[in-house]
Amino acid sequence: MKNDEREFYPAALTIAGSDSGGSAGIQADLRTFTASGIFGCSVITAVTAQNPREVTRIDPIQAAGVEAQLNAVLSTITIQAAKTGMLFNAEIIETTARCLTGRNFPLVIDPVMVSSSGTRLLEEAAVAVLADKLLPLASWVTPNIPEAELLLERQLKSHTELIEAAREFGERWNCSVILKAGHRDPDGGVAADIVYHENKIYELSSPRLSGRQAAHGTGCTLSAAFTAALALDTPWEKALQTAKGFVYGSLNESVRIGPGIEAMYPPATSYQGKTLLSKIEF
């Protein structure tokens, strides 16, 4: 078969840390890309020693090594969409921003700052650099509530405050926003995120699964599934529902990988019908 007769396969890029336990980071992103029909490329920013319960060590990659990885991918492969995750320090953020400036593909920024076990994944001195250098390049930003509180420098307690925060993110950094609030109200019947897009506010929800312990990596998986949908040129409304459904399905079809340890796993069927995107008048 001639090269020009082969089907073009869309590629997406993840720029993030490696999770030795496999539940989050680069591993979760690439697993999600593959399950979504996307060729996954990666730039590793740090090597972590972790499992779903704890992070025991972080070894950041030198900024020059991050730049070399970015140049190797971007100079050759046609990237349809990209996302960032754990960047760890100011030098890596500055390098990533410089290499991504002027690119014409959608960029999803997941501002990873703290692990689900409580370990700091972004140095305190790098928060301002993230806000000043990288967030202005974003098409979409996907903070969770603690990350939004750090970037906005205030606590977010009420539903109204979450809506105001999503709008402030969008207006300050001229981007669309998925404020991941699924962990809020654990006794409620739904896991609902706040979406800001084109000056409008929406709620993105799915049923809340009870008794599931595989929550590690939900944020990475959501942003990766959304990036994959954008790489497939999916309309934004469907992309949101596809990503939310992928997370719901990955939780619903979680697997046991050790004594008392469950992990999300790409679902065998589509759960897009389990999600709802509704406009909020605010």
Image: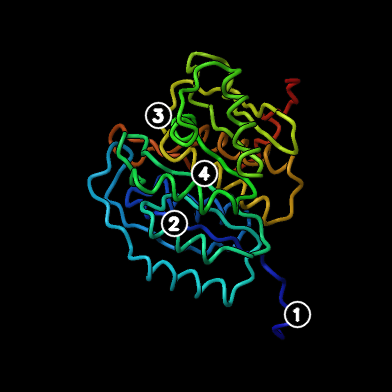
- Indicate whether 76 appears above or below 163: below
Query: Whole-Å distance between the Cαs marked 3 and 4?
Result: 15 Å
Residue at mark 1: 5
Residue mark closest to the camera, 2 vs 4: 2
Q: Which mark is residue 221?
A: 4
For the residue pair 126 and 113, the one nearer the viewer reads as: 126
Query: Whole-Å distance between the Cαs marked 1 and 3?
Result: 46 Å
Find out whether the residues at labels 3 and 2 contact each other: C-beta distance under 8 Å: no
Find out whether the residues at labels 2 and 4 contact each other: C-beta distance under 8 Å: no
Find out whether the residues at labels 4 and 1 contact each other: C-beta distance under 8 Å: no
Residue that extends furthest to the left in the rendered view of this protein: 56
Query: Whole-Å distance between the Cαs marked 2 and 4?
Result: 21 Å
Mark 2: amino acid: Ile
Q: Position of residue 222 (x, y in %)?
A: 55, 41
Residue mark closest to the camera, 3 vs 2: 2
Residue mark closest to the camera, 3 vs 4: 4
Q: Earlier in the sequence, mark 2 or mark 4?
A: 2
Mark 1: amino acid: Glu
Residue drawn at point x = 45 percent, y = 64 percent: 95
Query: Whole-Å distance between the Cαs marked 4 and 1?
Result: 33 Å
Q: Earlier in the sequence, mark 3 or mark 4?
A: 3
On screen, residue 105 versus residue 45, left or right, reads right
On screen, residue 88 versus residue 190, left or right, reads left
Query: Whole-Å distance between the Cαs marked 3 and 2?
Result: 32 Å
Q: Position of residue 186 (x, y in %)?
A: 47, 18
- Indicate whether 277 appears above or below 82: above
Q: Within 10 angstroms of label 4, few (less than 14), some, or many (20 or more) residues?
A: many
Residue at mark 2: 93
Residue mark closest to the camera, 2 vs 1: 2
Q: Which mark is residue 213?
A: 3
